[in-house]
Amino acid sequence: MKRKKKMSNLKKVILTFIILLLAWIFGFYLYTTYQNIEIEPQNYKTQKTQSTTQEQTVENVEENSKKVADVIEETTEKIVGISKLKNTGSSIFSNSDESELGLGTGIIVTSDGYILSNEHVTGSKYSKCYITLENGRNYDGTVMWSDSDLDLSIVKINAKDLKYVELGNSDNIKVGETVYAIGNPIGFEFRRTVTSGIISAKNRTIKLEEENKQSYMTDLIQTDATINPGNSGGPLIYPNGEVIGINTVKISSAEGIGFAIPINIVKPIIESYKQTGDFQEATIGIYAYDKEVIPYLNKTNNIDFDKGIYIAQITKNGSADNTGLKEGDIITKIDDTELNTMNDLRKYIYTKKSGDTVALSVTRGKVNKTFNINLGKK
């Protein structure tokens, strides 16, 4: 009996020893394995996610705001005051009111003194007006080109080495983008006022009634940046300073509805003056509407088309007269350029010269025709 009890105790001792030995071996294995693990510091980054991000955002906003302010300050140096009446003082930015001086705004577009503005500010071609630069110097200006339908004009002054604006691409604008308007509202006290807003809409058409005449302005940029009468002819710019439009009119019966003419329409003319000092405007010899104007016309005409330009009138003895074109035809293309607005047509014609031939693709009912037109001189 004692012998059995001794054997049982021995087994317990051996079993305990084996368990302890296994535990020691396992522990030693874990220790040596942990010691051999290499921790690479470069694989780990520590950062304060909330506070650091917020601080960086504030810095970015401040930096961007400063950059925009610098850009606007540089742009205002390229803005001019325009008056139809000559002031006897040292500057047209006098204490005389706007009605006396007819004060408006313009932008310098070349270093040798070409200035872009509205026709209703400068007057029509060959008119005289008076220009004041940002530094206070005064110049006599002559209107070299103007278009009453677009309400645009180009004035020349005898000056050199002027700072001039950078022109953007108005074809790529998007609704909701931030823009700034610069101009000379009211008079001396508020010259070169800057207002901010967004692009509210594109391709707007408005109907104008002046002196018992009706006219239409199409393809306009709508903005809620404040535009006052003296802002006419001033730029609508992006935060980077690129000019995308020329401020022209506002809706007087509502707040925050102003319009600018897309800059791309006049780019070919500016480039011609910059390169050659001249611009000879060609003409196709028609009076036409795009589809945005049709709702304003007499609905009994039953005019209905999805794209293209509607020929309302062919100028007698003009380029298109006796070519086979008819009133009511829809021009869908000029050469290889598709047409949907009158500005599409104008932009293309502005790149041509009198005597050039263009091909017009026309829809007449269900029939498609092509007419070759020799452009005349306007």
Image (cartoon, rainbow, N blue to C red):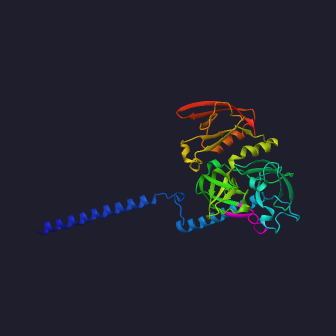
Q: Is residue 191 magenta?
A: yes
Q: Is residue 180 magenta?
A: no
Which range is magenta?
Answer: 182-195
Instruction: Locate residue 79: give its quadrant.
Output: bottom right
User: As rendered, which of 157 and 5 lies closer to the eye?
Assistant: 157
Q: Is residue 72 visible?
A: no
Residue 312 in the image: x percent, y percent? 63, 41
Give the residue displayed 75% in from the left and 32% down from the top.
Answer: 355
Query: Is residue 265 depicted above or below 366 in this figure?
Result: below
Q: Is residue 73 left or right of residue 156?
A: left
Q: Is residue 129 left or right of residue 171?
A: right
Give the residue displayed 56% in from the left and 31% down from the top.
Answer: 368
Residue 207 in the image: x percent, y percent? 63, 53
User: As rendered, which of 131 and 12 lies closer to the eye?
Assistant: 131
User: As rendered, which of 2 and 85 lies closer to the eye?
Assistant: 85
Give the residue displayed 85% in from the left and 52% down from the top.
Answer: 157
